[in-house]
Every structure is written in C-alpha cells, then in structure tokens.
C-alpha cells in the first residue's frame, strides 16, 4: 500500500464498532473506500461522505471523514450542495438500491446530466435490508420477499444502462466479494473528473438468500479488452446480465468519458470556492437598476 | 394628490409590463407608487389587470375604485367599469363598446407602427396625455426598458407608437385631472420577492436553490439574473426535495443558503426541514403563500399556511418563523433570517404571500446596515481523541460548528438522534440531553426576539402579521375620519413569540386580528400564546384586503360579530372570463 502524501488507511479508522450483520458486503465497501482514499493521498478532513438511509447509509459513521447521513433517498442532492459550496473537497455519495434507485431515483437521473465531480457508490444488495426484507427496485423477477410473497412481477431496474444513456461520465460495477478489485474501481471513480457511478453488488447475508456470495462468484467476470469510451459497447455489457438470463455479470469500468464538469462551467468558481467568498456585499448598484 | 389607474386586457397582451412602465413614469418623478397585479394561472386566454396607485403620500394597499380605466379588451370594461369612480375616466381601444370615456385606436396605431403588441404602449401614451403628464418622462422610461434588452430599434418604435397615442388625446383636447411631476428624485421600485432576494444577498447568502412555483418564482428569476454580478450560485433543481437538500448540503459545508417555494413545494421540503432541525444545520426557507390547499388558486393571495409552517415536519425541533409586512421588512427580515439560522443553527422560515411577493412598491433605497452574525464557528482545532464533538452539550444549547475541510474536525451530521460527536444513538439519557439542548436555543433566541410594532393608539387594536399590515395602516385613516381611535399591532417575529411585549402593546384595547385566511389562524395562535380571545376580520377569496374592508369589519365587530368575513358583492373571473360575458 502506498503512503504517498502521508495518508494511511489507519487515518480513516474510527473507534466505534460497525453495526452490520457478520459477513455483510458493506464491510468490504467501506474497507475499499478507505483504501482508495488512502492510496490517493486524500486527507480525511478533505473528504465528505453524504449518505441516505438504510444499512448503507450508516457508512459515514465508520469512516473518519466529514459525513452527513441525511434522509432516505437524498444523498445525491445533499452531496451536490456540498460540492457546489466547496468544490475543493472530495465528495462521495453513498446509498443503497432502494435509497438511490427507488425513492431517490429522480435525483439519480438529474445528477448525471450535471456531471458534478462526485463519486456515487451504491450498495446494491437487491433487497431492503434495514426494513427487514422487502423487494427493492433491483430485486430479481419472481423472487419472493416479505412484500412480494408470490414473487416479484416487475422487471428489475438496470442502473448501469440508465447511467450510460443518462449522461454519467463514469459507470462501473464492482462485487463486494472482491475487495482489491472494488478498491481499484473506487480509486478510478474518485480520480475520474465528473460524475462517477459505482454500483457494488453487495450480498445481504440476512435477507437475500438468492444473490449470495456464491451466486456472484459463479457469475461475475472482470471486463477485459473492453473499449470503455464506446457507449454502445458499454450498453451491450450493461445489458449482458439480462440477455444471459443472469448467468453472466460483468464487473469493472463499463464506460468512461471526459466531459466538462458543472463546477467548471461556473465562472463563479473559477477562483475560489463558494465557501471562501466574503460575506459582505454591496447592493447599491442592484438597487440603482431598480430605479 | 392620489390617482388610481387600472389597466386591463387579455393575458399575453403585455398588461404586466404596461403596469411596470406606468409605475416607473411616476416613481421617477418623486411619487410613491404601488403596482398590484391580478392574473390567472394561464398564459393566454384569461384576463390580466394591474392597479397602479400614485400618491404624494404613503401608498400601501390596493384600492377598490379607480380614477382611470385603461381598457385593452372588452372584458376590461365589463370587469372594471363598475369599479370606476363616478368622476373617473375610461380610455379604451376604439373598436370596443363603452358608454363612457374616450376611444383611441390603440391597436390600429400599433399595427401601423409595425407591431400590434405595442397597443399597450399606445394606451399608456393616451393615459398619460389625459392627465397631462410630460411625455419625455415616458420616453426615457421606454428607452431604458426596451433599449438595453431588446435593442434601440424596438425602443424607438415603441416611443413612436406611444407618442401617437399621446398626441391623439391631446389633439382631441381630452383631459382628466392633472398629475405634475413632483421632483426628479427617483425611487427604487421593488417587489417583496426582490426585497427578500436582496436582503439575503446583503447578508452574504451565496447559494439559492429552488423549483419554480408561483408566487415564489420571481425570487429565483431575480437571483438567477444577478447571480454572476454577486458571485453566488443559483440552482434550479429537479424538485423541491432536491432544492432543500442542496441548500442543506451547502450550508453544512459553510455557505449561507436559502430556498424559496410556495405551500405545495414546501410540503415536499418538510421532511428535510426536520433534518435541518435535528442536524442543527442553518437554513432559510422562504414560503410565499398562495391560495391553497393543493393547487388551489395559484396566482392569488392568502395567509393560510401559518399553522403549517409553525408545525411542519414530524417530531419537535427548534425553528424560527418571520413574516414581513412590507418591502423594507422583507429586506431586513431576510437578512436577519440568515443571522438567526447560523447563530442558532436552525431552520428559519420567512413567510410571505402573493400580495407582498409580487406587488411592486416604491421605496427609498435600502441603506440599513446589516450585521453579519455567523454564531459559533471554529476555524481550527487541535487533534483530539475520537471525533470532533459537533453536538457538545452546552449551556446555551449552541454547539460550535466546524466546516468540512478543517483539519481534525471530522464528524457526522445525521438525521438520527445522536451523541455529542454525531454518532447515531438511542441512549435514553443522551436523547433527553440532546432534545433539551436544542430546546435551549429557542429560549435563547426568544431573549433577543423583538415584540410587535405599534402604529397609532386607540381602544381598537388591529392585529396584523405579514402583508395585512399594509391595508390595516390605511384603515386607521378611515377609522379616524369616522371618529374611531385604533392602532395597528404588527407582528413580524411569529415564532418564537415575544408574548410579554405583545400583551404590553395590546394593553386594554379590543384585539381584532386581520388576516387573509378562513380559520383565523393567528387569532388561534394568540389564544394559545397569550390566553386572549381576539375577534377577527378575514378575507379568503384570493384578494388582499382593501382598507375599506377592514374599516367596515371593525364596525361589524363593534356591532357584535365575532368574525367579520369580507365577501365581494360583484364577481369577476380572470381564469375563465367568458363565464361573465
């Protein structure tokens, strides 16, 4: 592990104990994020993690950075406000599949158009965990859950294809069972200048008996020789899970392109961050214009 | 000298901009002016009207009767002729049917000058000629209005059209009273919403987020226009939930932030209002009331959301509610809201209404100093054991804030109940400590909360909040003429409420609350806060009070009515005018 700029993974540790089920994929995601931040030399105080509500939403408590555990589904607008106020910070948004693809789906669609330099990590366990096991937007067809005792009859949401078509400039998927790979993906996402989606397949060991570690190990494979600047090819890969009848689940970076960020388009942010501007303001000219 | 113009025409015919031009003609010549717009929630097909009140004295509220009706369509005559003063005058587009006044070929002249849309400028030219007002003033107004934005050619074309309207009336020798310019002293003409926007800017607000909603949208429009002049960020978001969460995030990161909406949008923001309360994140929320519930009557005024903003969101948490009654209060309270929000780390609601938000008032330029109080903010800190204690239990209830980016200040703000460092907690002991800590902030805020403003003195107390201040002050004059002594007790700081100061102001006068709602919400609030039982004068048809309504209401109450509801005797409808033809 690199120690460049004097940041170590230990700097991100907290003394509080995590409150996730033993074996939960969330442990690996938080560990991967800590490792990625340390290896990129990003200091804890320069990082803010905004999260929603759910098991995933608790993540900011287990990483020693600034954090805001907001409302269910609202991690993205919260993170956006933080980024616009101080674009010099590294801003990470975190949420689950219910949080980000269900109740917060409207924000997901629009943040991609804007291309803020924000990394969005989705803990996708295909179930509502904290509310004890109802169907989520990514729960597979026919799966029985507490809220769907006869099986799910609606199609699962495909976040990657939506992101590729919706304007995200970095679209990736990782598997929480492969920590080193997840860390590398998160590192690439943070390094990416623009909105980066990292959808992490994250087994819920308590409420999802279908999408287990074993299930993913059998199906996940890493993308190789893939042209990630080609949206059509990226889309093809994003649809592979559906077309293969969920037999093949590619992981890795599906899509990555450069596009000017929202922050870069604002002349107000060319010099200093919004938070650095002085409060005292002269309004006399504005009043003259109203005469 | 007091003169009331009413301009009416089809939606889309430039009635609103005609109102603005007319206001400028008089505000640039030393007059006090009020422009009160009435329009339906549609872009074409309905009816629009503006009342422009010009006076040497104070102007505060719209009037029931006008001196001159400027009619651009038949509906304007049907709707507004009955409200013309007996000695009043009508100037109308020649082809319309009208038994009274003067027909001028507005449309014909406009068409001959190249654009029928200019009939509103022709009409204004004719109107100004009738009162023998110097054309040069109008010419300069037109040049400033069109010149910058639409180019010189458009300005000159409008001036030619206006001059023809003006000369047509002069040649006919038509006259109606006379308005002489008083001085060349220009006044600021400003809406309540612009005043709120400028108050916030003056207070160092750097981030504004909103989703369009009448009658709050013009805050967004104004701020978006001046965004780069003031080096701030204005963001239109996908919905109101996003808007308030953006603002909350920006505030957490150390930037003074504000959102603006009306009742429907505020309904969507309510969950996050509680988050601001629990996470002790400063936030200013402008709620511009309109007729509710649901879509209601979107472009008309009401004060039906008082109880809503007082109690919005689940659970109990500190908040402040301020309600401006005029443009100066809008400016000052908007600035103060930012100070309260940061000093006490709580959401502050600035409650306005369509009448104040969208009407145009002339005023002296705001020269008041605005102090900037950011409260307790720690700019640097030493390394410590564990996380920064963002929610430290303090005597004042205020725990110092620290902004992301500050070394060693790492902590989590959270929507959960939490311990001193922000870690989610369900400890029974910590829960009570944190609830009490937050509650102490309200007690502290109350210590510096001013009481009401009192105008006049008398045995009758007209109690106002928000824009009912304006017609109530005018009603004092009518009551005085009728030999009744009355005062206005105007409340700006609604919550927390300085009841001691209120009761002192009331003395042993008879309390009569004046408000634009049907359930006398503020009267109920006073009953709860002060254990008094005020009477009420109410109006909830979508229009603001006329001073006459209030004076009549006082008489009705003196005769024994508990609640005097104002009802229009003659109906008009702007949304679907055809119904009344």
Image (spheres, rainbow, N blue to C red):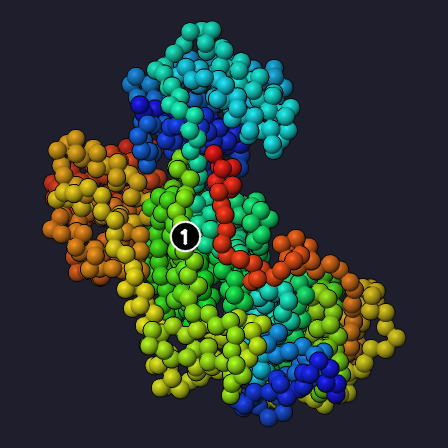
Residue B257 visible (yes or no) = yes
Tell me which corner region of the image, top left, top right, bottom left or bottom right, holds residue B362: top left
Q: Which quadrant does the C terminus of chain B fall into?
A: top left
Disc 1 marks which residue?
Answer: B370
> Which residue is drawn at the image coordinates 54% and 67% (left, top)?
B253
> Looking at the picture, how far across and down is residue B546, in whole percent?
29, 36
- Judge whether B531 appears above or below B230 on screen: below
Q: Which quadrant does the N terminus of chain B fall into?
A: top left
> Looking at the picture, how far across and down is residue B424, in whole percent?
47, 82
> Looking at the picture, how far across and down is residue B421, in whole percent?
47, 81
Q: Relative to A261, is A279 on the left or the right?
A: left
Tell me which corner region of the image, top left, top right, bottom left or bottom right, holds residue A168: bottom right
> Which residue is drawn at the image coordinates 41% and 44% (left, top)?
B367
- Judge whether A23 appears above or below B36 on screen: below
Residue A162 visible (yes or no) = no
| Front residue of this view, candidates B251 and A7 | A7
> Looking at the picture, how far across and down is residue A145, in whole percent?
58, 81
| Front residue of this view, candidates B323 and B306 | B323
- Judge whether B379 appears above or below B519 on screen: below
Q: Chain of mark 1?
A: B
Residue at the limit of the structure toward the right, as seen here: A225
Mark 1 crowdedness (10 Å alpha carbons): few <14, some 14-19, many ≥20: some
């Amino acid at each position: 592990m690199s120690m460049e700029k004097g940041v170590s993974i230990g700097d991100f540790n907290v003394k509080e104990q995590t409150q996730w089920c033993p074996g939960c994929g969330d442990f690996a995601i938080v560990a991967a994020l800590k490792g990625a931040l340390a290896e990129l030399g990003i200091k804890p105080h320069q990082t803010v993690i905004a999260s929603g509500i759910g098991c995933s939403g608790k993540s900011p408590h287990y990483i020693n950075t600034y954090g805001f555990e907001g409302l269910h589904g609202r991690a993205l607008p919260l993170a956006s406000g933080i980024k616009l106020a101080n674009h010099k910070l590294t801003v990470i948004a975190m949420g689950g599949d219910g949080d980000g693809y269900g109740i917060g789906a409207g924000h997901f669609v629009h943040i991609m158009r804007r291309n803020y330099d924000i990394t969005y990590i989705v803990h996708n366990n295909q179930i509502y965990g904290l509310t004890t096991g109802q169907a989520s937007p990514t729960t597979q067809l026919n799966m029985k859950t507490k809220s769907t005792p006869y099986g799910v009859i609606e199609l699962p949401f495909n976040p990657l294809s939506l992101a590729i078509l919706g304007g995200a400039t970095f679209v990736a998927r990782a598997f929480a069972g492969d920590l080193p790979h997840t860390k590398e993906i998160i590192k690439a996402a943070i390094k990416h200048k623009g909105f980066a989606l990292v959808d992490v397949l994250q087994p819920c060991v308590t409420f999802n008996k279908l999408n287990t570690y074993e299930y993913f190990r059998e199906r996940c494979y890493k993308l190789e020789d893939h042209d990630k600047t080609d949206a059509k090819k990226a889309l093809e890969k994003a649809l592979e899970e559906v077309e293969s009848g969920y037999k093949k689940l590619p992981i890795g970076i599906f899509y990555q392109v450069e596009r000017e960020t929202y922050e870069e388009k604002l002349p107000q942010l060319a010099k200093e961050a919004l938070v650095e501007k002085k409060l005292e303001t002269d309004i006399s000219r504005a009043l003259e214009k109203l005469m | 000298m007091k003169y009331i113009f009413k301009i009416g025409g089809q939606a889309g015919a430039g009635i609103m901009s005609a109102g603005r031009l007319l206001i400028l003609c008089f505000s640039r010549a030393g007059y006090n002016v009020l422009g009160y717009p009435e329009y339906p929630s549609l872009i074409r097909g309905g009816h629009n009207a503006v009342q422009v009140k010009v006076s040497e004295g104070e102007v505060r509220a719209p009037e029931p009767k006008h001196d001159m009706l400027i009619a651009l369509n038949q509906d304007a005559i049907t709707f507004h002729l009955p409200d013309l003063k007996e000695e009043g005058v009508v100037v109308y587009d020649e082809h319309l049917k009208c038994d009274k006044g003067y027909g001028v070929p507005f449309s014909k002249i406009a068409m001959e000058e190249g654009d029928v849309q200019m009939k509103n400028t022709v009409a204004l030219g004719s109107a100004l000629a009738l009162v023998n007002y110097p054309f040069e003033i109008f010419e300069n107004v037109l040049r400033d209005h069109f010149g910058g934005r639409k180019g010189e050619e458009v300005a000159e074309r409008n001036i030619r059209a206006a001059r023809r309207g003006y000369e047509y009336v002069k040649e006919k020798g038509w006259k109606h009273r006379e308005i002489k310019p008083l001085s060349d002293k220009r006044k600021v003409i400003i809406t309540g919403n612009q005043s709120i926007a400028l108050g916030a800017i003056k207070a160092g607000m750097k981030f504004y987020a909103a989703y369009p909603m009448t009658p709050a949208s013009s805050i967004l429009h104004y701020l978006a226009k001046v965004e780069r002049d003031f080096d701030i960020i204005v963001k239109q978001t996908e919905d109101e939930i996003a808007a308030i969460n953006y603002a909350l995030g920006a505030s957490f990161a150390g930037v003074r932030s504000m959102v603006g909406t009306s009742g429907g949008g505020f309904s969507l923001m309510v969950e996050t209002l509680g988050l601001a309360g629990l996470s002790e994140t400063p936030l200013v929320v402008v709620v511009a009331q309109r007729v509710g519930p649901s879509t209601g009557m979107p472009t008309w005024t009401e004060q039906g959301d008082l109880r809503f903003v007082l109690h919005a969101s689940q659970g109990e948490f500190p908040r402040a509610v301020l309600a401006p009654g005029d443009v100066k209060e809008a400016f000052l309270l908007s600035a103060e809201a930012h100070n309260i929000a940061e000093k006490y780390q709580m959401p502050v609601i600035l409650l306005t209404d369509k009448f104040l938000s969208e009407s145009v008032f002339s005023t002296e330029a705001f020269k008041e100093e605005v102090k900037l109080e950011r409260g307790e903010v720690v700019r640097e800190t030493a390394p410590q054991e564990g996380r920064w204690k963002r929610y430290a239990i303090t005597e004042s209830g205020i725990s110092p804030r620290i902004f992301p980016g500050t070394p060693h200040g790492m902590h989590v703000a959270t929507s959960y109940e939490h311990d001193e460092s922000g870690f989610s907690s369900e400890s029974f002991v910590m829960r009570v400590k944190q609830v009490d800590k937050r509650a102490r902030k309200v007690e502290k805020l109350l210590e510096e909360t001013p009481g009401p403003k009192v105008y006049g003195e008398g045995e009758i107390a007209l109690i106002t909040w928000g824009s009912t201040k304006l017609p109530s002050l005018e009603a004092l004059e009518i009551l005085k003429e009728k030999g009744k002594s009355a005062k206005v007790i105007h409340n700006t700081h609604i919550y927390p409420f300085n009841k001691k100061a209120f009761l002192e102001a009331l003395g042993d006068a008879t309390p009569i609350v004046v408000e634009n709602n049907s359930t006398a919400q503020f009267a109920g609030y006073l009953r709860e806060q002060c254990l008094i039982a005020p009477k009420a004068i109410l109006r909830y048809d979508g229009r603001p009070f006329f001073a006459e309504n209030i004076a009549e209401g006082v008489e009705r109450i003196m005769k024994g009515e508990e609640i005097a509801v104002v009802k229009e005797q003659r109906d008009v409808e702007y949304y679907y005018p055809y119904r009344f033809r």
